[in-house]
Image: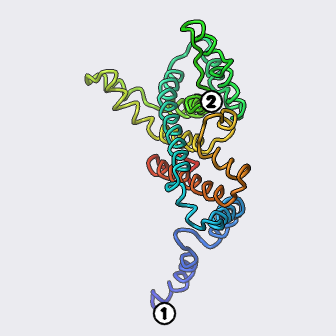
Amino acid sequence: MSTDEQLLPGARANMAPRQAMTGGFTRQQQRRHVLLLLPAGLFFIAFFLLPMVRLFLIGGSGQTGWSAYLAIVTDAGYFDSLVATLGVALATTLATLIISAITGVFLQRHKFPGRGLLTAGLTFPLAFPGVVIGFMVIMLAGRLGLIGAITQAVIGEKVVFAYSLTGLFMGYVYFSLPRTILTVMSTAEKLDPRLEEAARSLGAGPWRVIRDVILPGLKPALISAGAICFATAVGAFGTAFTLATRINVLPMVIYTEFTLSANISMAAALSFVLGAITWIALALARSAAGSTVAAAG
């Protein structure tokens, strides 16, 4: 018997596991992975995929048919509400990231008495729903608010902006800051101070260090937090509902179409478009920041 023939049974035995492997995993491992992913898959189908398909079909079942999905850009009222929604969301995201980047890095790198209390105070809005934050904006900048009383005493005229996009912007920033600050603080903790020292030793000034060392290190966290902030501001309803005297943002338009006008198909179409815009923004942020944007699909 030749050497090859003697090795043949062993070779066949070794080939059996290899034939059972696909993509680096054995069949047993693949079955285990399928079982582990099954609950998440069922949850995704039951609570996301099927409702979104149903919503999409309802949006095209009205009198205008599938053209309802174009109404958001062809109808002036819907388009203005979309522009206002995206505008206040972008402004909220930009302001929140600037404040959070400065505050988060400072709190992470400086130890002082009361630091823990200050951090807890900045994260306190996490406990408030949107309606409560709306009432707080009214008490601050409403007709009987603190800002109005101060401006009445100083300039003789009461300044009221709680019931406008400015008041909504204030409420959204207040609501978004805690999440962003915590994300920045956790990322700033991992920044290597030796890189900043090396940059300074090479002659880089403070702004150059911030631009070339600190901001690149914070970039994934800022993109991640900014995406969540933008998505929250686009779809938030409670604060807008509380301040809705002169606010025409898309969540309020959807609510009006559904409850007051009984235009269910248009409400469904607008809801689907709003959800698609938010999902696209999160997906783009995930592509830019890698796996740090957990909310993107």
**What residue lies at 31% left-to-right and 26% top-to-bottom?**
208
Q: Dot 1 lies on which element?
A: loop
From this view, report whether residue 4 is shown above or below residue 295.
below
User: What amino acid is found at the position of numbered circle 2 in the picture?
Assistant: Tyr
The residue lying toward the viewer, choosing from 30 and 1, is 30
Question: Residue 201: x, y in percent?
Answer: 29, 22
**What residue lies at 64% left-to-right and 20% top-to-bottom?**
140
User: What amino acid is found at the position of numbered circle 1 in the picture?
Assistant: Met
Residue 4 lies in what quarter of the image?
Answer: bottom left
Q: Which residue is mark 2?
A: 163
For marks 1 and 2, the one nearer the N-term is 1
Question: Residue 284: x, y in percent?
Answer: 47, 51
From this view, report whether residue 107 is shown above or below residue 226.
above
The residue lying toward the viewer, choosing from 221 and 48, is 48
Residue 64 lies in what quarter of the image?
Answer: bottom right
Q: Dot 2 lies on which element?
A: loop
- Give the alpha-carbon distance from disc 1 to disc 2, as whole Å: 94 Å
Q: Is residue 178 visible?
A: no
